[in-house]
Amino acid sequence: MGKKNKKLGGLTLQFIPHSEISRLETVDRIKKLLRIILDNKVIVLQGRLKPEEETRLIEDTMIMIGNIKNFKGVELAVITGNEEDQTFFDKFRFGLAKFISGQQNAITIIGPASVVKEMKKDPKKLEVMMR
Amino acid sequence: MVIRILRDFTKRMFGIFFKSKKEISLGFYGPPNAGKTSLANRICKDWTGEEIGNVSKIAHETRNVQFKEEVEIKYKDKSLKFKLVDTPGIATKIDYEDFMKMKMKKKAAQRRAKEATQGIVEAIQWLDDMDAVVVVVDATENPYSQVNITIIGNLVARNIPVLVVANKIDLRKAEMKKIEAAFPEYEVVGISAKYGKNMEEFYEAVFKLAKKAG
């Protein structure tokens, strides 16, 4: 009987602390993230991008789809803290902390579409479906 | 950011000095296949006699920003003139193989995918020129997608007033309550662009939206 070589599938999660991108300009932030994505890694970013940075990420992703072979885009999801049960004072405290720290109570997950099939989010959970 | 503030200020000053009654630019944004063009067609057909674009069950049918100027709607003694701007659906990924699954040939599918990516870039660039936006979502789909949140986040950052429209309420899977729960800070109107259901409530909401756009 011949030997069968089994290749183990794997997934690389790259954790990026907020401090690693906080001092970068938007262009450089997006460049850094997309470089990691092109390496077929799933990014777990502490904090979240500003809305205009998210659209910049989408724009650059679209340009790359046309120009990089086998690149189909990204899946993107942001998980924030549950604010439903907070009192008004808690909301004020956390709001201030978020403002100062750059929304570090959020986590942003960005995965290449070649690795992450879909990310489905609802208020209670995030489902990540891999290829 | 500074350039944007200066530009908005100049626009306002220009408007004040020349007192021209500028028609507002009303954009239709949202994910692919939500029914933006179907809704734009219904409005344009009702009020100008002409549709604005093609629709299809295959996503990314609209791959360019298309617009119709001087659309005038009249409702309950009120009238509103605007430039209707229909945009390509915004997505974070495009795979030509998805189009092939809908029986498209490989070359046509690849061309569609390329045009779709260019359309998304164009749609994002047009955001700055909108005075008000209708975000169209599919009432049968999960409203918590990051694309919806990103679009609305950008509109809030630009101080552009928003109306959320949940389309396809004619379908059994439509969940209006889920859509309303996802966007608690916004007015959400449920419609069927295909069958013209609840268009009166939609037009009422558009008038309110236009007032916020000034």
Image (spheres, coloured by chain):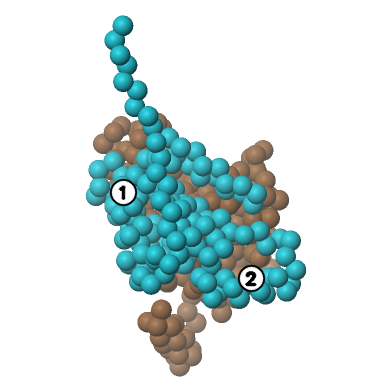
Question: In this view, which residue lies farthest toward the top?
Answer: A1
Q: Which chain is cyan?
A: A
Q: Secondary structure at mark 2?
A: helix
Q: Which residue is mark 1?
A: A38
Q: Is residue B197 visible?
A: no
Q: Secondary structure at mark 1?
A: helix
| Mark 2: few/some/many CA within 10 Å (<14, 14-19, 20+) | some
Foreground pick, A52 / B85: A52
Q: Residue at x 58, y 59 (%)?
A: A80
Foreground pick, B50 / A115: A115
Residue B109 in the image: state x and y as whole percent.
32, 38
For this view, does B11 lie left or right of residue A36? right
Foreground pick, B15 / B96: B96
For this view, does B44 lie left or right of residue B98? right
Question: Which label's residue is closer to the chain start, 2 or 1?
Answer: 1
Q: Which residue is mark 2?
A: A94
Residue B9 in the image: state x and y as whole percent.
44, 87
Q: Dot 2 falls on which chain?
A: A
Q: Name the quarter where the N terminus of chain A is drawn.
A: top left
Q: Name the quarter where the C terminus of chain A is drawn.
A: top left
- Tell me which amino acid carries mark 2: Phe
Q: Dot 1 falls on which chain?
A: A
